[in-house]
Image (cartoon, rainbow, N blue to C red):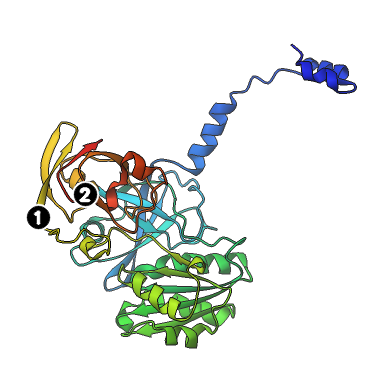
Amino acid sequence: MKHPITALYDDSGEITEEIDARERDTRDHLRETQRIVDEHHPRRLTLTLTDIISETPTTVTFRLARPDGSALPPFLAGQYITVFADGTSRAYAMSSSPTTLSHYDLTVRRVAGGRVSNHLIDNLAVGDTVTTTGPMGTFHHNPLFHGDDVVFIAGGSGVVPALSMIREIVDRGNARNLHLVYGSREHADIIFRDELEHVVRMHPNISVTHVVGGLVTAESITEAVGDLAGRMVYVCGPQALYPYALEQLAALGHPRIRIRLEANGAPAHPERDPSWPGGVAPDDEVEVTAGALLFRSPRNRPLLDALEDRGIRPEAACRSGECSLCRFRVLKGEVHQAQEAQPRMSDAAFGYVHSCVAYPITDVELEV
């Protein structure tokens, strides 16, 4: 049936006749689109551990590949995948280059008391099967906005996404300048030390400044990289690095909009957040109702962790308040949401929180 608007155009009759004469497209475009989406953004991957590479006394790289050897979904240097283990999950950035999709390299440092890092390092063996998400995350270089002269401030295992960026620059022969300022407690803790030294010798557009046993101060940043004006600065490392690095960069007059922080887990001490309610003891327990489940949990334990402890497994990935996969609704009670959370503008009005960085202040009822 011809639409009335076609009569307003010259020669519309010939055009519509030509269209009507075409062979009908009977392909299932929705199915094909979904296939492409699943191929590039799979909800789950089942991977095989093909190699374990010792990096430092406390750090190893796990090399993961598909059992059939086929290519893995593409990713951007700096992104992560989430590993499911020991009844929970943790996000780990890829250290491998996005130019090589035969495997993902996850470089994991042992954390004192760390549930998943210690479990992986102590228990994984070559040949084991590992379940992960597909690649995700917003911490990566954007060529349209970040420019070709960038600075990366890393602490400890925060160097992992930096190495992925560096490897991509080398593999693609990019002209981008990257200066890494890398803080470590001691020389033995420097991850990828030999590779970084080799890259610096061979590629003048990449430079590395090590800060060992000290702090990356505003003065040391200026001494290492010069004027920051117009340059994007990436920051990745332990949680304590973020407020400190922001303070040092602010002292240099660097605008916040030119600083990218990598999400790196829930805060270890949520009560130190300036927005934590005054006079509220973080260790005291409150009552949590989640559907038919009723239990008590300390205020300073993220709701996501508390639910996982009791066998409820909400979808989760970053565990840092960014991805929103663990978002759910609070029906009753007061919840503190850490400043790391990146909620939607409507979430507060309708009671939604990111459970990985949400802490019950009073007795609460959750819609799960």
66 shown above or below 159: above
Mark 1 neighbour class, 10 Å CA radius: few under 14, some 14 to 19, many 20 or more:
few
Residue at x 55%, y 58% (from the top left corner): 99
- Quarter containing the N terminus: top right
Q: Can residue 357 be seen in the rendering of this structure?
A: yes
Query: Relative to residue 19, is residue 293 drawn left or right?
Result: left
Per the image, the residue denoted by label 1 is: 284
78 shown above or below 56: above
Task: List the single residue furthest toward the right.
Answer: 10
Per the image, the residue denoted by label 2 is: 305
Secondary structure under the numbered disc 2 in the rendered image? helix
The circle drawn on residue 160 is: none
The residue type indicated by label 2 comes to: Asp
Query: Who is closer to the viewer here, 264 or 70?
Result: 264
User: Disc 1 and disc 2: Cα gap in Å?
Assistant: 16 Å
Residue at x 38%, y 41% (from the top left corner): 44
Q: x and y percent of residue 25 in the render?
A: 68, 21
